[in-house]
Amino acid sequence: MTESALDKPLRDFPWLPPQKARQFERFGIVTIEDLLTHYPKRYEDRRTFDHFPRLESERPVCVCGTVLAVAVKRLRGRRIMVEVVLEEEQATALSPRLICRWFNVYHVQKMIAAGQKLIVFGKPKDRAGKLYIDHPEFEIIEGGELSIHVNRITPIYRLTEGITQRMIRAAVYRVLDTLDLAAIQDRLPPGLDPTPFGAALRQIHFPDSDAEREAAHRHLVLGEFFAMQLFIGAKRAESLSRPGQNHCGPGALMDRFHASLPFPLTGAQKRTIAEIRAALASTRPMNRLLHGDVGSGKTLVALSAMLLCVESGAQAALMAPTQILAEQHYLNCKRWLAPLGLNIALRTGSKRTESATPLFDHGAWLDSVVGKSGAPRPASPAGPQIIIGTHALLYEGSGLYNLGLAVIDEQHKFGVLQRARLIGQSSAPDVLVMTATPIPRTLTMTLYGDLDVSTLDEMPAHRGKIITALRPASKLPDAAAFIRKELESGRQAYIVYPLIEESAKLEAKAAAQEFEKWQKLLAPMRCELLHGRIDPVEKDAIMEKFRAGKAHALIATSVIEVGIDVPNATIMLIENAERFGLAQLHQLRGRVGRGTRKSWCILISDATDPPALEKLNTMEQTSDGFKIAEADLRLRGPGDILGTAQSGLPPLKLGNLLADQAWMRAARQAATSLFQLDPQLTRPEHRPFRDLITSQRKLTLAQIS
Ligand code: ADP
Ligand code: MG
């Protein structure tokens, strides 16, 4: 038997009534594999049950008892309560009874009857000496199938309407029974894990012991991770196999740029530029991540890379996630690169700044700027050498006639697939992805596993300190007084309030109110308002005013979250700070402390719930982006951060990116050595892995469509 046994649709099994098969299908369980990878959410050890509880407890109990009585009580309105009294087996007069209650769950009364044997699971509560469990998970035990449902470590599954525990459990049991488990192809390379795949499938559903279950769990998680890493490795192999070009000029242009800067490069900037330079010069296409905390100076590294590319005769593009950011990059480029006389174009949805000289003699320009060198002159392309725009540039591709380097800025949700799209252009450009959100290592090797990594792990010297303070809303007037003093001494401030997304009208109203409030609080200093609904031209004007110091405070939604760079701004006040995510707060804080002056980040919040407090306290205690990323991952869970759909990675059913980091490393290592041995997986024994990649690709496509 081959893998295809797992591809067989459930409805082909004669023992499964078609109507049940349809119910499974509606639940997304179509094939044998779907059923067998619908893993248990937990287990009950039904070899021995708990005793009936005598005290209430936070720990759930799992007990088995006989139904003494079922009562349906009418409550107010059409509401009902079903009350079931259970008695322990071999009960004596002194044995406690247990009362199970369901409110407004109408089907329960039809299912449970006196005399039945019932297994229930839940937290017991004490009410006046009687013990209750409200809304327990339950299962009725009938004769017959006892060996499947009790007297064992029993799997408990996630359910949906019309599907019961017993249905799933029985179906899984039957399927496992009919399959020739020993013949199922292993999905891990030899040596990574001793458990055979077939055995793991059985033991994850019907474990003989806890140890067997753990071994099965490990095997299947490794399998998921390995498949993911194969997929990533294949992507990488694919992009490496494309013909690339040397996109690196001699460097005179970059040297002139560096010499014009008012500050020295950090050691990390020098190192990463050297890494990128080598990759640009290689004829293998570059796919690289530039990873660095907020404010570590990624833009400078990107511009250096772009200059190297331009000097080689090719075009370079810089893509930002928002229009505001694209425009900021454009202004920076113009300012920084003006002495070089470069032809720079901005292309965003609403703006096109085409050059006045559409035909630009690249070769002649190079000669004029860096002088005639012995190096061969590139052909003379027409049009801008540097194009700056939003990510839409990726898809339009317009005006990119000779793209040598694409830099993608500030986009950690920019998934593997979108990247592939760009890289998929016929002549592969070199690609540099920059992310401001520090990502824990496990996520880097999945989300960015197809990329080489350069890390900016050093901040520019003489940065002002940022002091973070958490304050209740009642202290807002004090904070405002403090801010006004800072503004009076020439500094600038950001005031951020959470976005109200219900409607454009509400949003505008909230914005207007915020603005009015702060204008009063900060009078006579000048405030400006910025939010997502303001038209782009006006937005620019406002940003420009703020950048030029003509406005003292910018009242804004989190539109200013990424990348905005105004070194004179020293205060970031965030209202209702608990409503923002940790990574987002860190990004917002990164807007200040960019100059040499001391800066403040004031978090206003009245939150009292523990996760919110942990979040805000983390902000107060650390400004280390990597620590923040770890805490964020812990608080939100990896699913959220990976943003499954955007990540373009196949979904995980069992593996946990946080808890199972070591296994991810092992899987990655195994995949890497496999590709080293056989880059195209052409060997016959690697055929199953090729099939795995194909099926992963299908899963991913299904996910994003
Ligand atoms: P980010 O990595 O967050 O994108 P930026 O590239 O916006 O950071 O840089 C943040 C600020 O630091 C900018 O004002 C930039 O001009 C400045 N900067 C960059 N490199 C250095 C350096 N080596 N020394 C001093 N300031 C620098
Ligand atoms: Mg930046």
Image (tube, grey):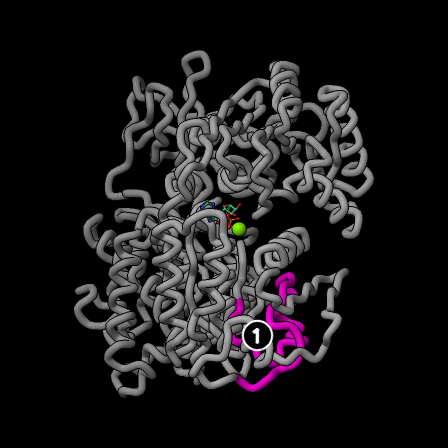
Find out whether residue 405 is within the magenta segment: yes
Which quadrant of the figure has residue 336? bottom right
Residue that carries the numbered disc 1 in the rendered image: 368
Q: Which residues are magenta?
A: 378-406
Tally the marks: 1
Task: Give whichever of 543, 498 is nearer the camera.
Answer: 543
Q: In the shown orientation, is residue 322 left or right of residue 641? A: right
Task: Give whichever of 394, 235 is nearer the camera.
Answer: 394
In the image, what residue occupies the spot 35% across and 53% down?
Answer: 442
In the image, what residue occupies the spot 54% across and 64% down?
Answer: 703
Give, as a three-letter code, the residue at label 1: Ser
Q: Position of residue 690 (x, y in %)?
A: 36, 80
Find out whether residue 389 is within the magenta segment: yes
Q: In the shown orientation, is residue 401 left or right of residue 408? A: right
Q: In the shown orientation, is residue 119 left or right of residue 26? A: left
Task: Give whichever of 406, 690 is nearer the camera.
Answer: 406
Above-or-below relation of 277 to 239: above
